[in-house]
Amino acid sequence: MPRREIRIPPLAPEDRDERARELLAPLETDGRVLNIFATLVRHPRLFNRWSPFGGVLLRRGELVARHRELLILRTAWHCRADYEWGQHVRIARAAGLSDAEIGRVIEGPGAGWGELEAALLSAADELHRDACIADGTWQVLASHLDERQLIEVPMVVGHYHLVAFTLNSLGVEPEPDADPFPA
């Protein structure tokens, strides 16, 4: 994946005002703030609304982490989102996906997945291509997921499209320790 030009750089720690420090404090890990947050905090009002929504989907959603990460990785693949891919490979591993499974996300729903996981990958594909989950895919999802989880499927894919579009367009650089986007 070719590196994009950094169009809007992360806000440097010395340039952060009190509001930026306040918004970033809960997101700091081991004394650092990820580039996504340090960049998007340049629009504090938007950041203040976006961050909690993303947090619900990522940390407090109804989908199990493994299923959420399959949706996110497939979305990152479709959007050629190197930043999103690099961050979510790490999260997917923590959610129990093996490196081999992460590699199979690229191959798509026909790459030896079980019924539900193949349907999740199909849902991501259909949402990306058609902006709607097809009836057959929906039926499979509905046979495994409850109503809240079903609502979250397109919300996760849509949210991570928004994130991919934004990060790709702004040229947000992946952290040095992030997994590279697959060739």
Image (cartoon, rainbow, N blue to C red):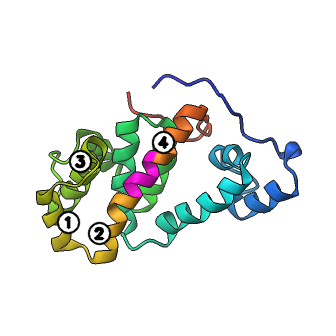
Q: SS of the residue at dot 3?
A: helix
Using the rendered view, name the quadrant where residue 174 is placed.
top right
Amino acid type at circle 2 is: Leu
* Pointer 1 with pointer 2, Cβ within 8 A: yes
Q: Which mark is residue 35?
A: none
For mark 2, what is the residue?
150
Q: Going 71% across and 51% down the picture, which residue do you hit?
A: 33
Q: Is residue 157 magenta?
A: yes
Residue occupied by mark 1? 141
Q: Measure the alpha-carbon separation of dots 1 and 2.
A: 7 Å
Query: Between marks 3 and 1, how big is the CA–CA gap?
Result: 13 Å
Magenta-highlighted residues: 156-161
Tell me which amino acid carries mark 4.
Answer: Ala
Which residue type carries mark 3? Glu
Q: Quadrant of the N terminus?
A: top left
Under mark 1, the amino acid is: Leu
SS assignment at label 4: helix
Image coords of residue 69 (percent x, y): 39, 56
Q: Label 4: which residue? A: 164
| Residue that label 3 marks | 126
Q: Quadrant of the C terminus?
A: top left
- Label 1: few (<14), some or many (≥20) within 10 Å? many
Q: Main secondary structure of the magenta part?
A: helix
User: Going from the N terminus, do you reach mark 3 or mark 2 first?
Assistant: 3
Q: Are marks 3 and 1 in contact (CB under 8 Å)?
A: no
